[in-house]
Image (cartoon, grey):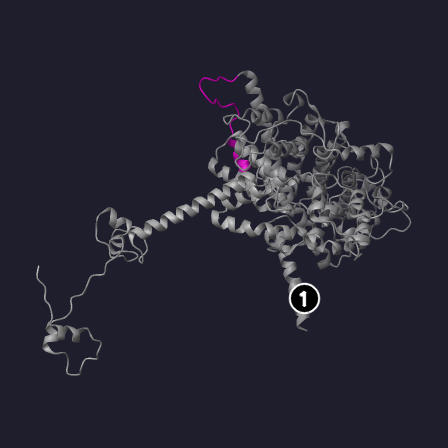
């Protein structure tokens, strides 16, 4: 092959960078131009290399563009194929070393550290980034745990969860933590020893090295202001039996059974943790809420049978997510010492598993969603809870009513069929209860337009209806709990709740017969209360799940009483020498009796006043039960409806604080709400909205409450809580006065009022 070669002199002139003359190039230069050399690439892209086509090394190359292919290079433009191989080998070695180091940490690290690593892996972080963060993260976390501000937060949270009364708590904080600059502050490590234990002020004083106070004159308890309460007051007396009870409650009880972590969850292989969490749920939640039958679920979980009709990974992870809200073990925390994030890892895993189910209508899916529903609400995500409830309602209609056969070779026996029908019926009533809870909470009609009428009977439930309630893990009790009687009473109350919400939110209130219908339903609900078995009547101390039954009743009946007129329309005038309770009609007083006794000509106005008085009286009565629960059990574990009742009672009494009985009851309910707010964002949002409502409506809260809110300001509410909240819970104090289009939801009101307060503060700063 021949090619043109220039003379040496001409070649030199052609390669020099001299400006060409104006007369143009010489004829020789024009004839002999240097040949353009093709640009070579170190390596072809994957698409060109596999097809043995020429590649120009561009990104993307023309061939990939023409064929709509992703243009991928194994090597960079500045390296050869050999250099690319070396680079890839070095990268693989680094990845191997990082994975090996991460595996070593997972094998030898604490449960908390391994859980943190797992959470970061699931969030998509690379092993190298996780190792880099862990290298510095331990120091940062330890520094945060030992910081004075964090220790103060942990101490105040522990204080709010004790069984101490509001006044004792205010005194303790005022004389020690808040005002005494020389007060000893324990280390975070010391305070974390309080986890898993029921604390009281005596124990905290010993921990802090404070002297025990001398006995002082006994304060007036709530029961001194209220009459006809069927049991001892929440703070009355210090009998020998109460002392023995408090000593017993300090000894942790053992879980009722052992359960395996595998094959039910991939997030932990700690059988002790899984046993602890499931036992928590079975003791404190399932007896009242009862989405699943304990005997069938436990047997299936212990067997590890993934084909069982009574247990599934989705169901187990939903239980673990909920139970973490009540646990203080390290494995329950998603972020160290952050109570609001407890169980988030299991919560996310449960929803991931639900997506994989693709909406299959099975018994375990229905049960799992019914458990996820209250968990979403307590986490301050009740918008998610409401949408979940809609799915529950639809799924309940599609779940098979007879036992599906898992294999042709296994024919179910008559006993198997009865077990499935029992579990199916209980789960369907739990789904119905979720719908009623949503309707009564957000003040809207329920999805079910027909009332469920297949009321369960004791004969259909467990053969042995009574079980021992131990109060695991904080108490050593041997209380007998009639679970069948409790569940039947709950289902009957749920039927009445359906009638109440249809009357409140799906009927014409201008109808002249509307007060008559309200009065008839009121009498029906009072009849339900009077007909309760003796074991479910309020007394000195009840098994904790029974308090949820009374809380549910109070929330529904107060809504029924206060529907006709806003509670805060007029304030009660202060009483002189007579007891405040004498001004309030008993909840059992019929409208006809009141009309005969009253002098008002306007029956409708009298009806509104009677209903308002009944709502206040019921709220005061429920506050006594709240104080009783707080006194016996503390506020580390709080049943879900108990939190709802706390909010309803507080908003009911908010504008009746001039009445001493209402003020005392409000203090107790708000005390319990603050304690719940240390653990649940939903309760924390309620307390914050109450405080902002009082500020924006000119209501003066009791001085003790203002003092407490000032002392725990950074602990009771943070700016970040506003962004975390996703709530449609309404402000009951202003819901009926709201204008068309005006939002009365917790999330919207808190953001609006805090934004207004911030603007006012900035305006004062500019002056």
| In the image: residue 33, left or right of residue 381 | left
Residue lying farthest to the left in this orientation: 2
Q: Nearer the viewer, residue 276 or 110?
A: 110
Residue lying farthest to the bottom in this orientation: 22
Query: To which quarter of the image does residue 409 belong?
Result: top left
Residue 310 in sight here = yes
The magenta segment: 391-412
When the figure is inspected, residue 488 is found, relative to residue 652, above or below; the finding is: above
Where is residue 183 drawn, in percent x and y? Answer: 79, 54
Where is residue 488 drawn, in percent x and y? Answer: 67, 28
Where is residue 7 drawn, in percent x and y? Answer: 11, 72
In reply to whether residue 401 is colored magenta, the answer given is yes
Q: Residues within 10 Å of mark 1 (few under 14, many from 20)?
A: few
The secondary element bearing badge 1 is classed as helix
Where is residue 388 drawn, in percent x and y? Answer: 55, 41
When the figure is inspected, residue 424 is found, relative to residue 654, above or below; the finding is: above
Q: How many marks?
A: 1
| In the image: residue 181, left or right of residue 326 | right
Q: Is the N terminus in the top left, top right, bottom left or bottom right quadrant? A: bottom left
Residue carrying label 1: 761
Tell me what residue is drawn at x 81 percent, y 50 percent.
Answer: 172
Query: What main secondary structure does the magenta stretch of the protein show?
Result: loop
Q: Nearer the viewer, residue 138 or 503?
A: 138
| In the image: residue 734, left or right of residue 123 | right
Q: Is the C terminus in the top left, top right, bottom left or bottom right quadrant? A: bottom right
In reply to whether residue 408 is colored magenta, the answer given is yes
Residue 72 in sight here = no
When the figure is inspected, residue 6 is found, relative to residue 699, above or below; the finding is: below
Tell me what residue is drawn at x 51 percent, y 18 percent.
Answer: 412
């Amino acid at each position: 092959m021949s090619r043109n070669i220039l003379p040496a002199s001409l070649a030199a002139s052609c390669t020099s960078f001299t400006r060409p003359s104006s007369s143009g190039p010489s004829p020789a230069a024009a004839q002999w131009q240097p040949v353009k050399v093709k640009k070579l690439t170190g390596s072809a892209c994957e698409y060109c290399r596999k097809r043995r086509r020429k590649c120009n090394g561009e990104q993307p190359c023309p061939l990939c563009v023409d064929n709509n292919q992703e243009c991928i290079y194994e090597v960079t433009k500045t390296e050869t194929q050999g250099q690319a191989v070396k680079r890839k080998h070095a990268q693989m070695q680094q990845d191997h070393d990082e994975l090996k180091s991460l595996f070593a940490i997972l094998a030898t690290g604490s449960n908390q550290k391994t859980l943190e690593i797992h959470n970061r892996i699931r969030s998509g972080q690379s092993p190298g980034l996780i190792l880099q963060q862990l290298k510095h993260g331990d120091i940062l976390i330890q520094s945060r745990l030992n910081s004075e501000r964090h220790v103060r937060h942990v101490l105040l949270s522990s204080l709010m969860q004790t069984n101490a009364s509001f006044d004792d708590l205010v005194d303790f904080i005022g004389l020690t933590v808040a005002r005494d600059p020389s007060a000893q502050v324990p280390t975070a490590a010391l305070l974390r020893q309080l986890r898993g234990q029921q604390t009281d002020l005596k124990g905290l004083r010993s921990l802090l090295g404070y002297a025990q106070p001398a006995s002082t004159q006994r304060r007036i308890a709530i029961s001194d202001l209220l009459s006809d309460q069927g049991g001892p007051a929440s703070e009355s007396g210090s009998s020998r039996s109460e002392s023995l009870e408090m000593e017993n409650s300090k000894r942790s009880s053992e879980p009722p059974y052992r359960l395996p972590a595998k094959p039910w969850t991939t997030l932990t292989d700690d059988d002790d943790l899984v046993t602890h969490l499931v036992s928590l749920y079975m003791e404190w939640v399932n007896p009242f809420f009862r989405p699943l039958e304990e005997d069938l679920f436990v047997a299936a979980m212990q067997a590890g049978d993934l084909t069982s009709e009574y247990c599934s990974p989705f169901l187990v992870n939903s239980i673990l997510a909920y139970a973490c809200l009540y646990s203080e073990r390290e494995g329950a925390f998603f972020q160290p010492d952050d109570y609001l994030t407890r169980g988030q890892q299991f919560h996310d895993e449960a929803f991931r598993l639900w997506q994989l189910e693709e909406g299959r209508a099975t018994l375990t899916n229905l049960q799992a969603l019914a458990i996820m529903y209250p968990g979403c609400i307590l986490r301050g995500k009740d918008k998610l809870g409401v949408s979940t409830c809609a799915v529950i309602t639809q799924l309940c209609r599609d779940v098979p009513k007879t036992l599906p056969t898992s294999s042709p070779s296994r024919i179910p026996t008559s006993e198997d069929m009865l077990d499935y029908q029992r579990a199916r019926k209980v789960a369907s009533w739990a789904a119905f209860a979720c719908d009623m809870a949503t309707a009564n909470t957000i003040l809207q009609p329920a999805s079910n337009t027909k009332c469920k009428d297949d009321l369960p009977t004791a004969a259909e439930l467990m053969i042995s209806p009574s079980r021992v309630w131990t109060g695991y893990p904080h108490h050593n009790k041997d209380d007998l709990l009639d679970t069948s009687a409790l569940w039947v009473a709950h289902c009957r109350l749920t039927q009445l709740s359906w009638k109440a919400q249809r009357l409140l939110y799906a009927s014409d209130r201008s109808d002249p017969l509307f007060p008559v219908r309200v009065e008839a339903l009121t009498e029906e609900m009072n009849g339900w209360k009077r007909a309760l078995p003796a074991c479910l009547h309020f007394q000195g101390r009840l098994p904790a799940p029974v308090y949820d039954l009374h809380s549910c009743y109070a929330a529904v009946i107060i809504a029924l009483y206060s529907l006709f007129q806003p509670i805060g329309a007029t304030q009660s005038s202060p009483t002189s020498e007579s007891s405040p309770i004498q001004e309030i009609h008993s909840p059992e007083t019929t409208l006809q009796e009141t009309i005969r006794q009253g002098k008002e000509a306007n029956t409708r106005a009298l009806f509104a006043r009677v209903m308002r008085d009944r709502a206040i009286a019921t709220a005061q009565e429920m506050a006594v039960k709240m104080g009783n629960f707080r006194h016996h059990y503390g506020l580390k574990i709080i049943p879900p409806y108990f939190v709802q009742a706390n909010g309803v009672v507080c908003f009911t009494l908010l504008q009746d604080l001039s009445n001493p009985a209402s003020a005392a009851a409000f203090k107790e309910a708000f005390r319990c709400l603050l304690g719940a707010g240390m653990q649940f964002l939903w309760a924390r949002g309620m307390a914050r909205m109450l405080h902002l409502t009082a500020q924006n409506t000119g209501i003066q809260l009791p001085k003790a409450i203002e003092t407490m809110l000032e002392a725990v300001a950074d602990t009771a509410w943070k700016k970040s809580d506003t962004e975390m909240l996703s709530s449609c819970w309404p402000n009951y104090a202003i819901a009926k006065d709201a204008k068309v289009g005006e939002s009365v939801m917790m999330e919207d009101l808190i953001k609006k009022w805090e934004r207004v307060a911030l603007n006012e503060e900035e305006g004062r700063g500019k002056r």
